[in-house]
Image (cartoon, helix red, strand yellow):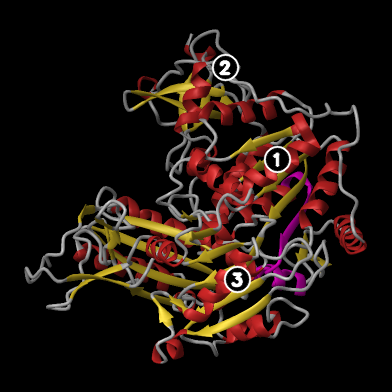
Amino acid sequence: MAGEKRYVEVLLPLKLKERLTYRLPEGWTAEAGCWVQVPLRGHPALGIVTGVSDHAPVGKPLSAIGEVEALPDAPGVGAAELAFWQMVADYYLCTPGEVFRAACNVGLQRQILQAGKPRHKARKKKAAKNGEAEPPLKTLSEAQRQALDQTRDGFARHKPVLLFGVTGSGKTEIYLHLAAESLRAGRDVLFLVPEIAMSKQLQQRLEAVFGDALLVFHSRTTVPQRYAVIDTLRRDPTPRIVLGTRSAVFLPFRNLGLAVVDEEHDRSYKQDDTAPRYNGRDAALMLAALHKADIVLGSATPSCEALYNVETHKFVRADLPERYHGGKDPRVEIIDTAQARRLGNMQGSFSRKLLKEMDATLRAGRQILVFRSRRAYAPVVQCEACGEVVRCPHCHVPLSYHKFNSTLSCHYCGYHRPFTLRCPSCGETALMERGAGTEKLEEELRDAFPDRTIARFDADTTESKTAEEKMIRDFAEGRIDILVGTQMITKGFDFERLALTVIVRADSLFAVPDFRSDERAFQLLTQLMGRSGRRGEQGRLVIQTDQPEHPVLGRLLHPTQESVDAAGLLAERKAFRYPPFVRMICITVKDRYEGRVWNVCRLIKEAADSLGIADIAGPVTPPVDRVADEHIAQFWIKLPRNRSLADTKKALYERIDRIDRDFKGHTTIQIDVDPA
């Protein structure tokens, strides 16, 4: 009885513009949002039903329509989830299937196929159960109470709130009060942090306050643990607070009441690698709007985008201008390393003056944090005989020397080979390391302070969750005297004994070819400045640089009421037509054959011209123009923020999608909306 068969439209986690149609076996029923297992190219695939019909697709023979293989016993995907996926796809110029893939990766899909109920349940916390007692919140200072009132006023006006609080001002306690209010109202809370490393200390505080109501979701938790979080949110109506990194925005919230985006300026919220190339902060704003939820974005160094939204009255600003424990701002000292070298006052990577200050700090029983933006022993290896720099054979970048395992490694494609002194170009045994990464700084500090405990916190030493947590715990409990690290150590940690923060080779922060480089350098320096002196004591920040007169350093030495020169930065962005005054799109073309890259670029340029897009730079080669044997070229497009923006983006995406399909299997075209 062909007329009685029903057909389902299925969304699959793939880059497909159209939904595929399958027929249900006789007697089976399905509805929008339920999971289905279907055949795809001879293999089973898991998808979501987005529509049900009594009629087969027009023009498609019944024999060509596959049959649903199974209906997994798992809670369905709600209409709000599907609507959010579509919003993200439309804004970031990708397909809903790619958003589905980000929301539910392969591991989670397999977990769903195994059974309806998870085998692993969320771990119980030792805390009061929901409703038994008020959570143990700390008493707020007068400044915190005023900021909390400002935040509530913004929520009453149905606007996002920018909580502008100096480092150590106690923004977290305001978040906790707001979260408790949302949970008491029976609504969920999403608490986003930019890095997994930040979540551990915060998790302990949230567990103490919210107990069983807390769920944790990030890539360092296991697949069963992540599935347990998803299953709990779908099955259990009890209000929850979810602590997670950017991917947590895709969790199935039923009744979201509050979203918190801590360190909203942080670049780690941006997904760069695969579509959707979304920003977790901006996606959280979309999610909150969809659920009619409150949202607060916190930072000591807000992004230009957030400041612009305050100026244009899209956001409400709440201020927290003083530290919770009182005390003065850290004392900032700039050491001119160019002059120190001329006077013979350098000992390796450190000035003699700095080493004396470090020794005095250690003698006082305090700890030191040393920051360097590059890991490895040396970022570059060069031949003293012929001058050749040893480069990766697959990428247009120098190989970094890692002394601990005696290898030369590429930090882009992962290529590595044993280190020898013999130059691959001239054959002389004259290879020498140039520059200093975190590994070399660790070695120099061990020589300078042989009786002290020194550790290194970077991607080479914290590959496992256990190693990362142990090092943070050891430093927090005073078992490490000096901790050397990369950006990973700047992320919101609270170390009671830390008195001195040191930045080595700060010039590398200013040399990035990006219109945001000064903004980011100031944000990072301010975060590092706030790591020390967090218990009423005055901490110290010492910066070694060859550019002591750089304007970013001037803002640190002579702070105004604003922690960033908001007016100056925004005026500069407006004059040169940069975000937030325009929307920017980066289109990247990659191919193993350079000629094909430029051929595709020509077609993209013609497509942009046909749409009347005038402000387009490119195609140009980026600073690293070959990675993993693929040549790279880019376009940078600026679009005015007007009513035609969405239509122009959609039309551009459709043209590029056609080009992409013509060259599929050879050339990769990536679209990045609002590149970081």
Q: Where is residue 167 in the image (x, y as percent from the top left)?
A: 72, 65
Q: In this rendered view, identify the residue nearer to me: 534 or 68.
A: 534
Q: How crowded is mark 1: few (under 14 residues within 10 Å), some or many (20 or more)?
A: few
**Residue nearest the viewer, comparing 247 with 419:** 419
Q: Which of 487 and 618 lies nearest the eye of the viewer?
A: 487
Q: What residue type is labelled 1?
A: Gln
**SS class, disc 2:** loop
What is the CA distance from the residue labelled 1 to the residue labelled 2? Answer: 25 Å
Q: Residue 119 carries which label?
A: 2
Indicate which label's residue lies in the foreground, 1 or 3: 3
Which residues lie in the magenta part? 290-311
Disc 3 + disc 2, Cβ < 8 Å: no
Q: Is residue 596 visible?
A: yes
Q: Is residue 297 magenta?
A: yes
Q: CB under 8 Å between callouts 1 and 3?
A: no
Where does residue 229 sit, x and y in percent of width and height? Answer: 63, 30
Q: Which mark is residue 360?
A: 3
- C-alpha distance separating marks 1 and 3: 33 Å
Quarter residue 328 falls in: bottom right
Residue 122 part of the magenta segment: no
